[in-house]
């Protein structure tokens, strides 16, 4: 579950996270690459101790770490996407869409003809609504788990 600060950060970072998810998925779909086994004199040289010098193994490790990071990004993006419907006020919808498109608060204010302070107030209202829903959902799931556990006993 995300707290208000994490929700605010995710809203701010949503645009680049979505772009990075697309980029990483394209890279994962890419087959091949230019990794080749060493040949010639390098293949006979002693390898350093304490780490792997296998480029394939290192690439597998790097991609595994990227995969875990990508999962975190996807979780954050999905968290927001599943709660967009909560925002029903027209001004809040406009601010939210601008935020998701990567616009700064100043740019949103200029676009909408509102002060930055007013935009921040609207953004805080959006964050509060999403946060309240997340807490309610988390509480509902927690109490449901307790109920299910009692029934199983």
Image (cartoon, rainbow, N blue to C red):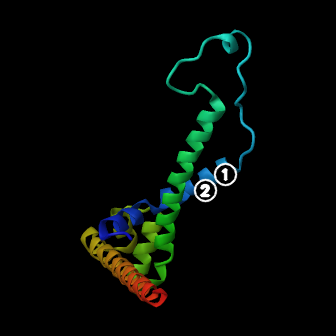
How packed is label 2: few (under 14 Cα within 10 Å), some, or many (20 or more)? few
- Residue at the extreme left of the image, as rendered: 117
* Image quadrant occupied by the N terminus: bottom left
Q: How many numbered discs, if any?
A: 2
Q: Is residue 42 above or below residue 24?
A: above
Residue 87 visible: no
- Residue at the extreme front of the image, as rendered: 153
Residue 127 visible: yes
How packed is label 1: few (under 14 Cα within 10 Å), some, or many (20 or more)? few
In the image, taking residue 97 as reference, residue 53 lies left or right, namely: right
Q: Residue 108 at x, y = what percent?
A: 38, 68
| Residue in the foreground of this view, choosing between 14 and 140 | 140
Q: Residue at x 62, y 34 (%)?
A: 57
The secondary structure type at the circle numbered 1 is helix
Q: Residue 144 at x, y = what percent?
A: 43, 87
Q: Residue at x 34, y 77 (%)?
A: 131
Q: Which residue is mark 2?
A: 22
Q: Quadrant of residue 135?
A: bottom left
The secondary structure type at the circle numbered 2 is helix
Verify CB contact (< 8 Å) between mark 2 and mark 1: yes
**Mark 2 → mark 1, Cα distance in angstroms:** 6 Å
Q: Which residue is mark 1?
A: 26
* Image quadrant occupied by the C terminus: bottom left
Which of the numbered marks, if any, corresponds to residue 81?
Answer: none
Q: Residue 61 at x, y = what percent?
A: 57, 40
Q: Residue 11 at x, y = what percent?
A: 41, 66
In the image, taking residue 115 as reference, residue 138 lies left or right, namely: right
Q: Is residue 84 above or below residue 144?
A: above
In the image, taking residue 142 as reference, residue 55 lies left or right, namely: right
């Amino acid at each position: 579950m995300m707290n208000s600060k994490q929700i605010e950060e995710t809203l701010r970072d949503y645009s680049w996270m979505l772009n990075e998810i697309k980029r990483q998925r394209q890279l994962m779909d890419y087959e091949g690459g230019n990794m080749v086994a060493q040949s010639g004199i390098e293949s006979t040289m002693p390898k350093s101790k304490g780490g792997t010098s296998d480029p394939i193994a290192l690439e597998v490790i790097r991609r595994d770490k990227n995969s875990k990071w990508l999962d975190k990004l996807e979780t954050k993006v999905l968290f927001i996407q599943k709660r967009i419907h909560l925002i029903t006020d027209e001004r809040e919808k406009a601010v939210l869409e601008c935020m998701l498109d990567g616009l700064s608060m100043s740019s949103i204010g200029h676009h909408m003809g509102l002060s930055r302070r007013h935009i921040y107030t609207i953004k805080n209202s959006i964050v509060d609504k999403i946060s309240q829903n997340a807490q309610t959902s988390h509480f509902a799931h927690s109490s449901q788990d307790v109920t299910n556990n009692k029934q199983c006993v």
